[in-house]
Amino acid sequence: MPSKPNVAKPKGISPARLEFLRQEAMRTMLEMEEAVVRTRNQLKTMESTLRRARRLVETGRPARQVAELLNAAQARAATSSIIREVQGARHRAQQAQFKLSAAEGSTMAEIARGWGVSRQLVSRMVKEPSPRRKKT
């Protein structure tokens, strides 16, 4: 006979609050997913730029000229920016997941084990206020 999954009971959380946390978790996961897609696209662009740079250097072009021809400064800045964006999205998604898990009745230790992080990190992130959403 299959056993029921071990589902904790929500601790003093209203159904409306639990639904809000669930919606927030889904929203932040979608935000992270979109950031990952943008990151992948930027990394593909950077890969092409590096390939072209290598070919130009192989033909004997001076490195300074290669950097100027390929607008290396802009490519580097765009890549750094998108990586910061995905890191922020990851943090918000992870925090929303931690808060939802805690509201559903999971302990900090259970959440930490599931995510492979410390219990202290989970506790800190559950307690910290959620970042304000940007108006779009």
Image (cartoon, grey):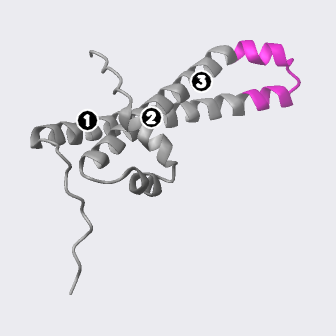
Secondary structure at badge 2 equals helix
Residue 26, percent from left and from top = 27, 41
**Residue 50 is drawn in which quadrant?**
top right
**Residue 29 is drawn in which quadrant?**
top left
At horizontal 31% and vertical 54% (from top left) the residue drawn is 106
Q: Is residue 105 magenta?
A: no
Distance, label 2 to label 1, CA atoms, is 13 Å
Please tell me which residue lies in front, 136 or 134.
134
* Residue beneath disc 3: 80
**Are the residues at dot 1 and dot 3 in contact (C-beta closer than 8 Å)?**
no
* Residue beneath disc 1: 24
At horizontal 83% and vertical 27% (from top left) the residue drawn is 57
Magenta span main SS: helix
Magenta segment:
53-70
Distance, label 2 to label 3, CA atoms, is 17 Å
- Determine if residue 37 is in view: no
At horizontal 19% and vertical 57% (from top left) the residue drawn is 9
Query: Does label 2 or label 1 sit earlier along the sequence?
Result: 1
**Residue 28 is drawn in which quadrant?**
top left
